[in-house]
Amino acid sequence: MRKHILALMAPIALLFGEAAQAAPFFALASWYGPGFYGNLTANGEVYYGDQYTTAHKSLPFGTRVRVTNPRTGQSIVVRVNDRGPYIGPREFDLSRASAQAVGLIDPGVATLQFEIL
């Protein structure tokens, strides 16, 4: 429950211009691939899998998030530019490049650490 509260606090802080640095939290993530290339994202950009971007249901577009795979120690900073994922308890959908950078390609779905910057 605490991780969900922390995840919600940062976007609220962004709306009021406050420091948005929140404690890191863990969430289930997946990635979306070639079937989406060329489609428009929710913020109107064309989706290309070679960019470091992510989808989230409610974080403001443009929010930067540090994603770390605790199993591999690999980390990347991504930018929210889309909405979703809408499958089960997943909270983030990473672009292919982002997923590859943190070692998420093979498992497809994993619990990763997120930190809103």
Image (cartoon, rainbow, N blue to C red):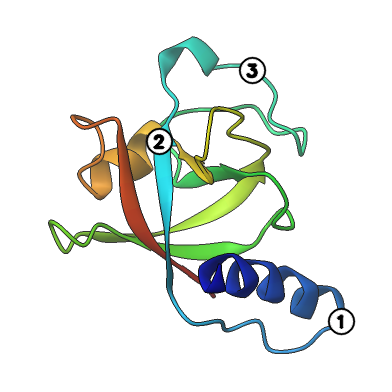
Q: Are marks 3 and 2 in contact (CB under 8 Å)?
A: no
What's the distance in space between the residues labelled 3 and 2, CA to CA? 18 Å
What is the residue that sits farthest to the top in this orientation? 35
- What residue is at 36 percent from the left and 44 percent from the top? 98
Quadrant where the C terminus is found in the figure: bottom right
The amino acid type, in three-letter code, at marker 1 is Phe
- What residue is at 29 percent from the left and 30 percent from the top? 108
* Label 2 Cα neighbours within 10 Å, binned few <14 / some 14-19 / many ≥20: many
The amino acid type, in three-letter code, at marker 2 is Ser
* Label 3 Cα neighbours within 10 Å, binned few <14 / some 14-19 / many ≥20: few
Name the residue that disc number 1 marks. 16
Quadrant where the N terminus is found in the figure: bottom right
- Of circles 2 and 1, the one toward us is 2
Q: Secondary structure at mark 2?
A: strand
- Of circles 3 and 2, the one toward us is 2
What is the residue that sits farthest to the right in this orientation? 16
Q: Secondary structure at mark 1?
A: loop
- What residue is at 74 percent from the left and 57 percent from the top? 60
Q: If you read the primary sequence from the N terminus, does the residue marked by circle 2 or circle 1 appear first?
A: 1
Q: Quadrant of residue 95?
A: top left
Name the residue that disc number 2 marks. 30
Q: Position of residue 35 (x, y in %)?
A: 48, 10
Q: Secondary structure at mark 3?
A: loop
| Label disc, if present, on residue 105 of the rendered structure | none
The amino acid type, in three-letter code, at marker 3 is Asn
Q: Is residue 116 above or below residue 39?
A: below
Left or right of residue 17, residue 63 in this image: left
Q: How many marks?
A: 3
Q: Is residue 96 above or below residue 23?
A: above
| Label disc, if present, on residue 39 of the rendered structure | 3
